[in-house]
Amino acid sequence: MKKNFLFAALAATTILAGLASCSNDDDNNNGNQIDPENVVEDDASAISLVNGVYSHWQPLSSSFSFIIELNSNKLISFEGEEGEAGPVNSRFEQEPSTWYQIKIFNHLFLGIAQANEAITTVTNSRQLGKVSEAGYNAAVGKAKFLRGLAYLKLVQLWGEVPVFTEEGGSTTERQSIDNVFNQIVSDLTAAESLLKDYDGDPRVPSKQAAQGILARAYLVWGDKPLSQAEVAAIANTQTDPAFAKDDAKLQKAVEYANKVINSGKLALDPEYNKLWGREYESNKRHTNEHLFTIAHDGDKIDAQGNHQTHCSWTFPYQNGENGQGYNQNHTEVADDDLYDDWKAEFPNDKRLAETYFTEIKNPEDGLTYHYYSPIYTPVNGKGVDQSYENAENLEITKNSVDRIEIRYAEVLLIKAEALVQLGKNAEAAEPFNQLRTRAGIATVSAPTFDQIKREWDYEFTYEQFSVLNSYRWKDLISSVKKVANYKHFANDWQSKQTYTEDQAAYFTKVHNHLRAKYNNVRGKHYRQPIPTGLSGEELGIAQNPGY
């Protein structure tokens, strides 16, 4: 996950300035004066051009967790020293110079800029008859899908951001929340009309993938994201704002979720644990739950391998037991309580054992390794390639598992939540209970909002939703402060159990991170800081409140 693995091919220039497409020039809008260097020769070249946009998504697959999950009560980071990018996010000490914020913000905008150029080039090529209608639809549909998704990530994490497309716009002037969402909806509805139906390959954006992301976008928009002024009012406090909603947009979330559901092309995989790992990626089981994924073939093959497994399972079988040292994973489950609380409520939930590993047998030495205090905290099971049963995980050296951006389970839960927020709790039971039935826990006749929130945790823990959901529900501060109830938060934690010297050193770091989360979280953390460019240059974008 370190910086030196990345960007060897990127120029050390200002990332955003000048990247807005020049396709709004008269020459590019005049079919008789198209720049011959700004065309492709055939459909395959058009698709290949758009596929280049993925090079800006691949480095982000694991990086999203270093903001979305670390800025929550669920995950802590021991990647590097305490002042490095992973740990400072874990401690709510991020700044404009923090690496993961720099990386994600800049790559999303680089992808947008490349999508803009691709749309212009493919449009020119279509006008000249070099690209067929089908080729145009596939290429431009994919480009607009990726651009809409990028703007959705940006507005969720940074609020008002610049909007620029092939038609123009500013790379520095921040747009209102509504303007950003209008662009998202414009892109994704265009993608919906241009793309083909889901054909079983989740690496390829489809009509149903666009509809699923539209359902997500309307749910986020329907929960009224905070404006810059609203964040400024609470920036230096530990007070959550009031929850608010927009029923019309929530109804649109239901509408788009229904489009996916009614297509009949997606389904839940009957085995929850089969969703993660190389043997189960890209719909190899043909169960059609993965709706859209980011493809990975591994380090030195794609732009950057997916380090989600590497970071969660950095040092297999070296957690202090059996005389093999005491190395720390790059990301760690925040404390045993996350496992304990779930087990106390639903001990038979099939998802629990796949989300939190508390013991694993190593077939190489026949020993069972435990992940529970005083030995360790549980391991994030979704970060371990579950293709491997009772074997040392080889994926930590390959980083080739595809990242799931959206799966069918999310579509069902989006529909259920939007219906509950609309007061249609009984109607929400059907999609909600599909998840519970697969998990093997009791169904309900009318889920409550609190049950919906818990279901997001049970179904999607460590799948890069935590802080985004807290932003929607306006409970960031109260949810982070739950760490005060964790067993290693109290100052006398060491007196309650017997620890070896190495174990005490490990849990001291756990304690310090839990304390830092509780003490440092503020209203300003409803936004991430506007970062610098990849080379440390200022981007000319007004900073978010409190940073």
Image (spheres, rainbow, N blue to C red):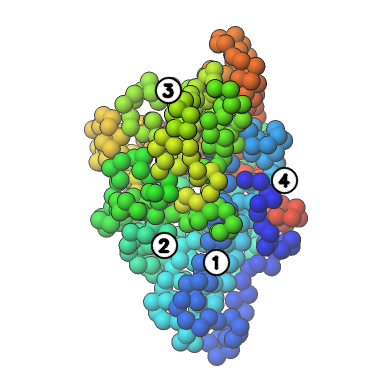
Choose the circle earlier in sequence order: 3 or 2.
Answer: 2
Q: CA distance from mark 3 to mark 2?
A: 38 Å
| Element assignment for label 3 | helix
| Cα gap from disc 1 to disc 4, whole angstroms | 27 Å
- Ranked by sequence position, the earlier of labels 2 and 1 is 1
> Measured from the top left, where is residue 310 in percent x and y?
55, 42
Q: Earlier in the sequence, mark 2 or mark 4?
A: 4
Q: Which amino acid type is marked by label 4? A: Ser
C-alpha separation, residue under disc 3 versus residue under disc 4:
36 Å
Disc 4 marks which residue? 97
Task: Kindly indicate the quadrant of the structure image that contains residue 38.
Answer: bottom right
Q: Residue furthest front?
A: 365
Left or right: where 144 falls relative to 175: left
In this rendered view, identify the residue nearer to me: 13 or 182: 13
**Distance between mark 2 and mark 1 Cα atoms:** 13 Å
Dot 1 corresponds to which residue?
52
Amino acid at dot 2: Val
Residue under pointer 2: 204
Residues at circles 2 and 1 in contact by the CB criterion of under 8 Å: no
Please rate how many residues cluster around mark 4, counting C-alpha atoms within 10 Å: few if below 14, some from 14 to 19, many from 20: some
Residue that appears at 28% across and 38% down: 438
Sequence-first disc among 3 and 4: 4
- Locate the C terminus by quadrant: top right
